[in-house]
Amino acid sequence: MITIIFIFGLIIGSFLNVCIYRIPRGKSIVYPPSSCPACGARIKWYDNIPILSYIFLKGKCRNCKSKISPIYPTVEILAAVYTILVYLKFGLTVDFVFYLVFGYMLIVGSFIDFFHYIIPDRISIGLAVVGLAYGFLRHEFVHSLVGFVFGFGLLYLVAVLGKAIFKKEAMGGGDIKLLGALGAFIAIKGVLFTLFVASLLGSFVGIVLIALGKTSMSQRIPFGPYLSLSAILYVFVGYQIITKIYGV
């Protein structure tokens, strides 16, 4: 079963790569079929097998020999590993299905934000709709709704105060909507945990990059990946961490 779940995750990861590439460019994610970004050649099915094709082709397009980004196998492996972890935690249940969608959408949103500094509405708003539907099915719609409003409102307040203090945009609208969407899944405690951990992670990475001369204080750093990673961390171990520290 683990092998089947892993292969399924790899296949989904291949599709997530399509979403990551096409969504910020305003292209359809279903048509046309996959093609090389460099030469436009249609990719044959045997050159589109997750991980294996990348290895056999030595990371190059069969037609034009241009390099294939290592992001592609990375996303496939991430999706596969995440799928296994969700299966181990929830089994083949409704929770398993919804948290797969949760993680897959966060992977897409994170990579888009990392490369393009945007979180598309179809990711954040779509995730919010799925989260509210999940809450409804679990008979916890009120908790999901309150979590959504709290997450959105909390980061919106941070954005308003930050702009007033620093006289420039302190938080992107995509991040605000994303935290609201996360709240629909993980409620108020999850929102607080996510924002706290994401701020720590973002600050640490930012300081390291500045120290290495890779960025500057004025340069924008995408916050979506840190929110996504922190929310996923909460799903798996966050509640246990909070309980252990505060006993609640």
Image (tube, helix red, strand yellow):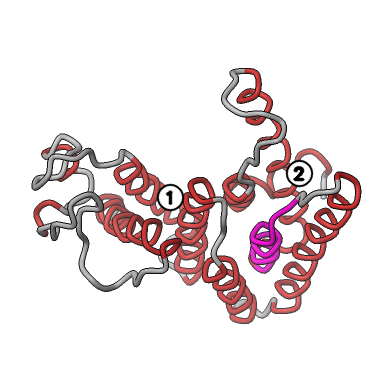
In front: label 2 or label 1: 2
Q: Is residue 79 left or right of residue 240?
A: left
Image position, residue 24 (x, y; %): 45, 61
User: In the image shown, does 115 or 86 lie closer to the viewer?
Assistant: 115
Q: Nearer the viewer, residue 201 or 27?
A: 27
Instruction: Look at the picture and state if 102 lies above or below 6.
Output: below
- Per the picture, the main secondary structure of the magenta-coloured stretch is helix
**Residue 91 point in image, percent of width and height:** 43, 60
Q: Nearer the viewer, residue 35 or 133?
A: 35
Residue 191 in which image quadrant: bottom right
User: Which mark is on residue 130?
Assistant: none
Neighbours of disc 2 within 10 Å: few (<14), some (14-19), many (20+) = some
Query: Which residue: 32% across, 48% down?
Result: 76
Indicate the amino acid at tag 1.
Tyr
- Span highlighted in magenta in the image: 171-184
Secondary structure state at the residue bearing disc 2? helix
The residue tagged 1 is: 82
Residue picked out by circle 2: 196
Is residue 84 on the magenta stretch? Answer: no
Q: Does the magenta segment cover residue 176?
A: yes
Residue pictured at 29% horizontal, 72% vertical: 30
